[in-house]
Image (cartoon, rainbow, N blue to C red):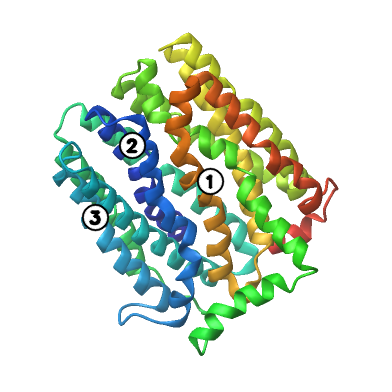
């Protein structure tokens, strides 16, 4: 369980560097919202990581185990990549920032593939639920480093030192990966690259019927679309409302993780009581309502108390929805092809955050922050409408769900 938590922290750190710290850095340097929004496209490797996931299944690096070798290599590269942001000047060369952000996303996505497969092989079935919950929460905990500590340090230190300090936290993942045990029952590596590539897709699309498989993929793509757009430019939003970086770090980001942690724990209990399907319905609807709180914040201005309430509500409900959604993804994964299939599913989750979120800067400029958050709520509706097909409202067998998760 400790290994799962520490590796989850290592997975989340690079993502939140790009999603929070880099955004605040660019906005302070005078970069426009359109450019910051388009920078989200550098996260496309999170969307397409299933394309090279079979390589990690098939080949082993000459260091540590099959999974840990890939993870450790990526973590070392990410340390240098994150630190390198402090050497760049976005005013003179925005292209270099884009190139580095793309490289960090590529290596971070590859680390995720290796660690997801390692966790699946390390844990017996009855520990997968707890291990996944700890991973997700530690993943969120990682945001406190770039989005809270990093922004606070940026008020007192040069940006080069800020990025170096944040990069040093990758040592958590490196030490954990180096010292972690090998799985006692490591999954058999595919004998050929063709088997590693074709097998997972053949199994998925052979279930029930082809149309149902497509609906399942579409649901994964759309269920959290509105929320992904709503939170994509929160740091610039807070700055434009009038909050200082210190307030953002202490309040907006400081309360986010505790709220998400409580939400995920409550969500786990609710799933055990009511099942995955019902929780997807209830948490999805409540999540749409919660994101409307940002409209009140945009109208009110820099009210610290209201900021705390809105952020707490958003991340509390987000934790609920994430618990149900991750359990749903785990249930949809075939145990024989967990690495590639989970990479495919998690890639679909990342797609709204990258492609759709890249247009949010233009949408905000066109309609303003208040109508932007209304649009985000509307974009969440199609995913909810698909629930009737992929997760019908019914009480499910709790034991069957627990074993599948």
Residue 190 at least partly seen:
yes
- Is residue 187 in view from this perspective? no
What secondary structure is marked by label 3?
helix
Residue at image location 35% in from the left, 50% down from the top: 14
- Look at discs 3 and 2 and give the one toward the viewer: 2
In the image, residue 125 above or below residue 1: below
Placement of 326 over or under 278, stated as above or below: below
Q: Position of residue 313 (x, y in %)?
A: 57, 26
Residue lying at the far right of the rendered structure = 394
Sequence-earlier tag: 1 or 2: 2
**Front-most of residues 95 and 167:** 95
Q: Identify which residue is drawn at 68% across, 62% down.
A: 332
Viewer-proximal residue among 366 and 400: 366
Q: Position of residue 397 (x, y in %)?
A: 82, 56
Q: Are marks 3 and 2 in contact (CB under 8 Å)?
A: no
Which residue position holds label 3?
A: 81
Marks 1/2: CA distance?
Answer: 18 Å
Within the image, what quadrant is residue 378 found in? Answer: top right
Where is residue 296, by image quadrant?
top right
Q: Secondary structure at mark 2?
A: helix
In the picture, measured across the screen, residue 42 lies left or right of residue 87, that is: right
Q: Residues within 10 Å of mark 1 (few under 14, many from 20)?
A: many
Secondary structure at badge 1 equals helix
Q: Which residue is mark 2?
A: 35
Task: Tell me: residue 178, above or below residue 165.
Answer: below
On the image, numbered disc 1 is attached to which residue? Answer: 352
């Amino acid at each position: 369980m400790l290994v799962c938590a520490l590796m989850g922290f290592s997975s989340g750190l690079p993502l939140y560097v790009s999603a929070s710290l880099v955004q605040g850095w660019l906005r302070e340097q005078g970069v426009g919202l359109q450019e910051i929004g388009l920078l989200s496209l550098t996260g496309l490797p999170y969307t397409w990581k299933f394309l090279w996931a079979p390589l990690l299944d098939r080949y082993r690096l000459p260091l540590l185990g099959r999974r840990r070798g890939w993870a450790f290599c990526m973590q070392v590269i990410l340390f240098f990549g994150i630190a390198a942001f402090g050497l760049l000047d976005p005013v003179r060369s925005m292209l270099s920032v884009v190139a580095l952000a793309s490289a960090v996303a590529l290596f971070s996505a590859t680390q995720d593939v290796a660690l997801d497969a390692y966790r699946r092989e390390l844990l017996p079935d009855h520990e997968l639920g707890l291990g996944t919950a700890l991973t997700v929460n530690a993943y969120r905990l990682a945001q406190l480093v770039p989005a809270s500590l990093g922004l606070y340090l940026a008020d007192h230190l040069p940006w080069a030192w800020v990025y170096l300090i944040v990069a040093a936290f990758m040592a958590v993942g490196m030490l954990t990966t180096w010292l972690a045990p090998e799985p006692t029952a490591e999954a058999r590596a595919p004998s050929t690259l063709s088997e590693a590539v074709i097998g997972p897709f053949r199994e998925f699309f052979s279930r029930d019927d082809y149309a149902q498989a497509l609906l399942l993929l579409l649901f994964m793509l759309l269920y959290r679309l509105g929320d992904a757009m709503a939170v994509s430019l929160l740091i610039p939003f807070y700055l434009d409302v009038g909050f200082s970086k210190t307030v953002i770090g202490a309040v907006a980001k400081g309360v986010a993780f505790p709220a998400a942690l409580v939400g995920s724990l409550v969500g786990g209990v609710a799933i055990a009581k009511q099942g995955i399907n019902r929780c997807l319905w209830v948490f999805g609807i409540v999540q749409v309502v919660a994101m409307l709180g940002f409209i009140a914040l945009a109208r009110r201005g820099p009210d610290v108390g209201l900021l705390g309430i809105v952020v707490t509500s958003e991340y509390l409900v987000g934790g609920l929805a994430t618990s149900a959604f991750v359990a749903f993804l785990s249930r949809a994964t075939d145990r024989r092809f967990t690495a590639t299939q989970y990479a495919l599913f998690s890639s679909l989750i990342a797609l709204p955050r990258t492609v759709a979120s890249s247009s949010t800067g233009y949408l905000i400029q066109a309609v303003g922050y208040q109508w932007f958050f209304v649009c985000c709520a509307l974009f969440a509706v199609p995913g909810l409408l698909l629930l009737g097909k992929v997760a019908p409202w019914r009480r499910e067998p709790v034991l069957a769900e627990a074993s599948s998760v």
